[in-house]
Image: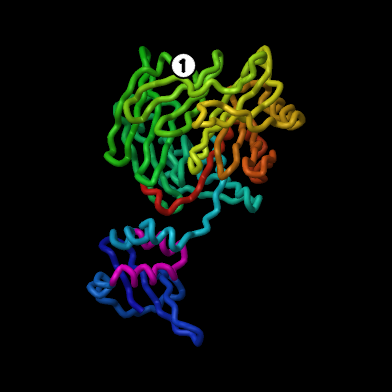
Amino acid sequence: MFRLRAHGKKPITITTTTTTASTFLYWSPESSPTAVASPVAMDPIIWSVLPDHLLDQILSYLPFKTLVALRSISRHLQSLILSPTFLSDHSFSLPSFLLLSHPQSFNSFPLFDPNLHSWRTLPLPRSLSLSCASSLLSSSHGLLCFSLSSSSASSLTVFNPLTRSSRSVKFPFYPFHFELLTLISSPDGYKIFTLCSSASSRCVCLYNASDRSWRRFGGVDQLLPRGFNQDGVFYNGSLYFARSEPFMIVSVDFNDGKWTTAIGDGVFPVNDDITFARLVTDSEKKTLYMVGGVGSNGICRSIKIWEFKEETESWIEAETLPDIVCRKFTSVCYHNYEHVYCLWHKEMICVCCYNWPEILFFHVGRRTWHWIPKCPSLPEKWSCGFRWFSFVPSLCASV
């Protein structure tokens, strides 16, 4: 048994236990009941000269929670644990969740596991629960983005719940009146897109975590009217928005900030109106979908899903919501389609409403529609402000 200690960190003890079957290693904090009161210290030099393939073999025996704790021991261990080779060779079966946020929830979030059809709770660290007050704005590949609740706050917070690590992102200027904030995470880092409004004009502000800098672009006032409240979706290097009255799909390129209108002519109804349109994207397969309400005189009579075919630059109708389910959903949103929003989660297109705690989703692979019921722990007084996010825990999502 030996102990590792990094400067300013709590020591971690490695204990070797011999059994009749085999010899195995496990790591435990000093306070663990499996740790011995007087461990034998190991010379750090010995540990530092162990070949990477031996370290990789040792790490492969450790439980997932221990690997998360080991990231703070040294940069070398962190690089080994987060290396693509290690993560691919020792894949971790992590569940994914639909996360529910509400203005009156301060310390935790309800999580729904679609595979097990069960509810869990994601507690927030005390530092976040007190300052952020559940002002969750966006989620992407295991990262959550919060705004601070204080009126004098001048930053955002990006948080990885799995590794319990966070980073403060300072605003580019103050006061910073932002809207339509979207977090886009990738293996190379993350970006934060938002619109900044002033009395005279609006601009696009884009934060890049790789160099921790903000950029500003113009041209938004001509394409997205004030009061537009639907988040964009990231697809092929651009962020796309669907607007109605008149119906239009617009996008902004992250490289040069150039705005363009729509892609493809589409196969849309010609005799009826599109009462609302929302975009979702499958980032793994790089597929873009649109959920739209079709009707007349501003009243939705049916809900359809279109898939964008990049090779032909056209939209193809993929699915129609059954009439009985459509009637229930339209009664839920009271024909106030501004309250409707959509998101993608693990082969599911989720159709949500700010004033309804349930989710209607379409499973793309099975081509079936389902309802996710109300969380049993939600108080009855919570009648509006429900916001759902896709939360896929990731060990390698760095803040």
Instruction: Classify mark 1: helix, strand or loop.
Output: loop
In the picture shown, does residue 373 fall above or below 36?
above
Looking at the picture, tell me which residue is in the foreground, 86 or 101.
86
Q: Which residues are magenta?
A: 51-71
**In the image, residue 69 lies in the stretch drawn in magenta:** yes
Looking at the picture, tell me which residue is in the foreground, 378 or 199.
199
Which residue in the rendered view is the most extreme toward the bottom?
Answer: 20
Q: Residue at x 45, y 19 (%)?
A: 261
**In the image, residue 190 lies in the stretch drawn in magenta:** no
Q: Residues within 10 Å of mark 1 (few under 14, many from 20)?
A: few
* Residue under numbered circle 1: 226
Query: Left of 367 or right of it: where is 103?
Result: left
Residue 98 quadrant: top right
Residue 4's x, y, as percent?
31, 70
Three-letter code, disc 1: Arg
Which residue in the rendered view is the most extreme toward the left?
Answer: 45
Residue 305's x, y, as percent?
62, 30
Residue 74's x, y, as percent?
29, 61
